Image: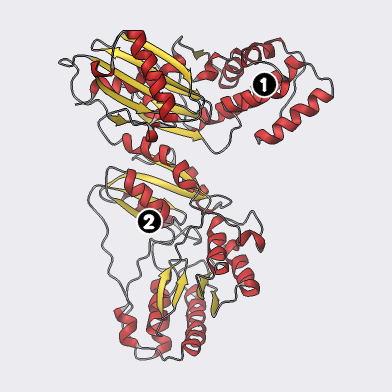
Amino acid sequence: MSITYHVCKYTPVELLTALGGECALLDEAPDVFDLSDQVAHPNLCGFGKSVIQAVMAGHVKEVVLVNCCDTIRRTYDILKEFGNLDFLYLLDILHGKSGCSVDHAKHQLMDLAEAYGRYKGTQFDKNAFFAAFAPTTPRTDPHIAVIGAKMGTHLFSLVEETMPLPVENLTCASNRSVVAPEDQAEFAALIEAYARQLLGQLPCMRMTDNTARKQLFHAPGLEGVVYHTLQFCDYYGFEYAGLRDHLSVPLLKIESDGTTQSREQLRTRLDAFAEGFATQKGATTMDKHGYFAGIDSGSATTDVVILDQDKNIVAKVILPTGAGASNGAQRALEQALQQAGLTEKDLTATVTTGYGRGVIQTGDKSVTEITCHAKGAHFLNPAIRSVIDIGGQDSKAIKVEPDGSVSNFVMNDKCAAGTGRFLEMMARTLEISLEDISTIGLKWKEEITISSMCTVFADSEVVSLVAQNKALPDIVHGLNQSVATRAAALFRRIGGAHPCMMTGGVSRNKGVVGAIEEKIGQPLYIHPDAQLCGALGAALFALEMP
């Protein structure tokens, strides 16, 4: 039997089942949108693109859509033109739940029943209709909820894998709870009662009155929320914006594009969020003996710190990561051990962190760089309440609690703009060293704005400025301002508090530091070991391991 696929909680699954259909949520996530991009606009959100991709790949032959938004309307038009489907139907449901909305839905459902029954060659089976209703029991045990835009199983499985508590999928397509209507003698009366139940579900953001969604954020047993948004979709971005300052449980926002590509990009954020639910302080260190290593494997450098049992730093090393994270980590650890006059057998515990932590063989445990930077910063200065970390591949802002734990964080890890790699590329374009680019901009005279948000386009913009004979200090100052603008935006998004410490290799860039200080209105605390914060935090976690 062929499967009739749908993508919306308002799809009348029970009606389709009663007409002989086998229904399933279209939950595929392709690696790329190569087929959908041939027939759809590139800025169509991943919700619609994933449907088009599955159809164009020949995996789907029957689709029933609901007019959730303009994306689905456009998706329907594209599939009607290019889909080569056996059955395609767009159910036009109004965005209300009573009065004319119910009456309109009733007629839409009856039209669908006629079209689908004709396609299947079947009649409505009332017994099958009522048997299709699935009972729903609200979760009350301690759990984490995924809320927001539709999340496919590829990404939801990652959330389940990383979270320390059970996870419930309450995103728009999965949060379905249709109660069976009372039995009616006449088909039209039954369908009207069914329409009322369909529209009466806990609303999604498409509904005009969606205030009942507050129940999602005050459910019994709710310990945290992972809020999912889709690229190019505004529906759920609005809800998230209103939650940030009012939700009483930890909140993490993640955004995907509807492909599998974003899965690993989001792992660090999910891991860091999960670490917030675990007790990170481990066993008491009073009886700990020996030496404890932290390895921070970054995209540009690998840093190692070795502590003794009294939390004294006995070795610290910063080396280029090179082509392989595992090899780079081993080289850095060997150099640190040599510096301290130790061997690997002298290490009681080792914790890895950073971009390459997942591939490093040496280590007893891995902790995300977000948690490690917070812990390291707190160790160097317990008064610190925020951290701005600009590394080689990503930049992040972290809000730190008085005990050194993380209360909030945001990351920019999808683009090189605003990172150390950005500055490295610009230095190469300008034919100056990284050491020079850190100070040349301090002598600027003319305000120059680097407007491009993309590193590649910014590089072209810099080449153009050089061709215009703009002074080198002015160009570098413009680059510093570009990096600082992004860092300050991250700082404001976490509700950054002062004092704020800057970590990572870019903390040595005086021009960037000064530009960030200007934008956040406060001086940054820069410690001589700021670049080692991640490795230091990892070593502290190693010392506290049970």
Q: Residue at x 39, y 32 (%)?
A: 357
Q: Residue at x 43, y 47 (%)?
A: 227
Would residue 260 be seen by someone viewing this image from the given angle?
yes
Considering the image in quadrants, where does the N terminus appear?
A: bottom left
SS of the residue under disc 2: strand
Residue 306, located in which quarter of the rendered image? top left
Considering the image in quadrants, where does the C terminus appear?
A: top left
- Nearest the viewer among 177 and 26 is 26
Say left or right for 506 vs 8.
right
Q: Is residue 179 above or below residue 538?
A: below
Q: Residue at x 52, y 84 (%)?
A: 111
- The outermost residue toward the left is 287
Residue that label 1 marks: 427
Q: Position of residue 397 (x, y in %)?
A: 48, 28
Would residue 382 be seen by someone viewing this image from the given angle?
no
SS of the residue under disc 1: helix
Say left or right for 168 vs 525.
left
How has the structure been colored for display?
Answer: secondary structure
- Rendered image: mark on residue 170: 2
**Amino acid type at image mark 1:** Ala
Residue 204, located in which quarter of the rendered image? bottom left
- Nearest the viewer among 267 and 345 is 345
